[in-house]
Amino acid sequence: MNNLFIPLQAGTFYHIYNRGNNKENIFYKAENYNYFLRQYDAYLSDYVETYCYCLLSNHFHLLIRVKDQISPLPVGKKIYTLPNQVVSEQFRRFFTSYAKAINKQENRTGSLFQKNFKRKEVTSGTYFDNLVNYIHTNPVKHGIWDDFRTYPHSSYQRMLWDTPSKLFKTTVLQWFGSSESYTTFHSENSDFDNIKDLIIEDE
């Protein structure tokens, strides 16, 4: 099995995955999904580029690229300078912030997320479009939504919106060639055997 906790390196693409502790929900209400994205943006947008995402009731998937230049991050009396240190710490802070809000909302205690988030390096550009497709079609894969194109908590539709966003929409659509090629690829490709080494399954 590939190492799912490899160090995060600057300028590198990763498939990021995490789920609720003991497979419990991390989203309870519709507004939780939007709050998750706002907190993610607040904690991570200075450090990573986000290419696509999908949020489901008890887990989420992201395709990100760690930025080339990472600013040092004060952590207590220390200063983190390595990309893995900085980005991992920001993910930790993000998870903690979101978990505190959900625990208060649900009157619960304890960990909301699994302790370590999984990641796999995307080492080949030929897998990029397939991985985007896989992440966007996850709701259908798990049997929670009939048509991934209408699922409200993924970046599939946002890619097609002509509105400013920190999501790297232009890059993704250029990768596919056009918005038409993007939608066609998603509709016609559902065999993910060719990227099984990049997929993080929900064990």
Image: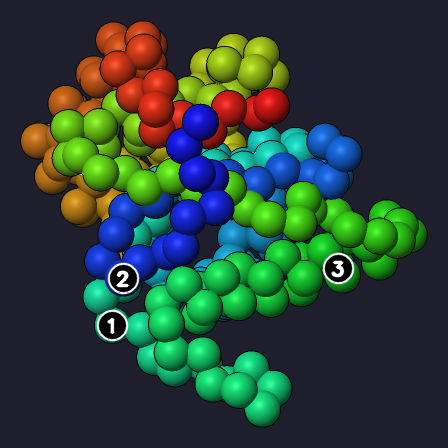
Q: Quadrant of the C terminus?
A: top right
User: Where, by quadrant of the figure, is residue 60 drawn?
Assistant: top right
Q: Which residue is mark 1?
A: 69
Extreme residue in the bottom direction? 77
Query: Please, is residue 10 above or below residue 109 in the view?
Result: below
Q: Which residue is mark 2?
A: 10
Front-most of residues 195 and 98: 195
User: Where, by quadrant of the figure, is residue 182 drawn?
Assistant: top left
Do residues under tags 2 and 3 come within 8 Å of each other at their CB atoms?
no
Residue at x-position 21% and y-position 17%: 185
Instruction: Name the front one of labels 3 and 1.
Output: 1
Front-most of residues 65 and 5: 5
User: Nearer the N terminus, badge 2 or badge 3?
Assistant: 2
Residue 160 image point, x, y percent: 27, 36
Residue 200 image point, x, y percent: 46, 29
Name the secondary structure under disc 2.
loop
Front-most of residues 30 and 144: 144
Left-right relation of 55 to 109: left
Residue 197 image point, x, y percent: 34, 24
Name the secondary structure under disc 3.
helix
Name the secondary structure under disc 1.
loop
Q: Amino acid at mark 2?
A: Ala
Q: Which residue is mark 3?
A: 101
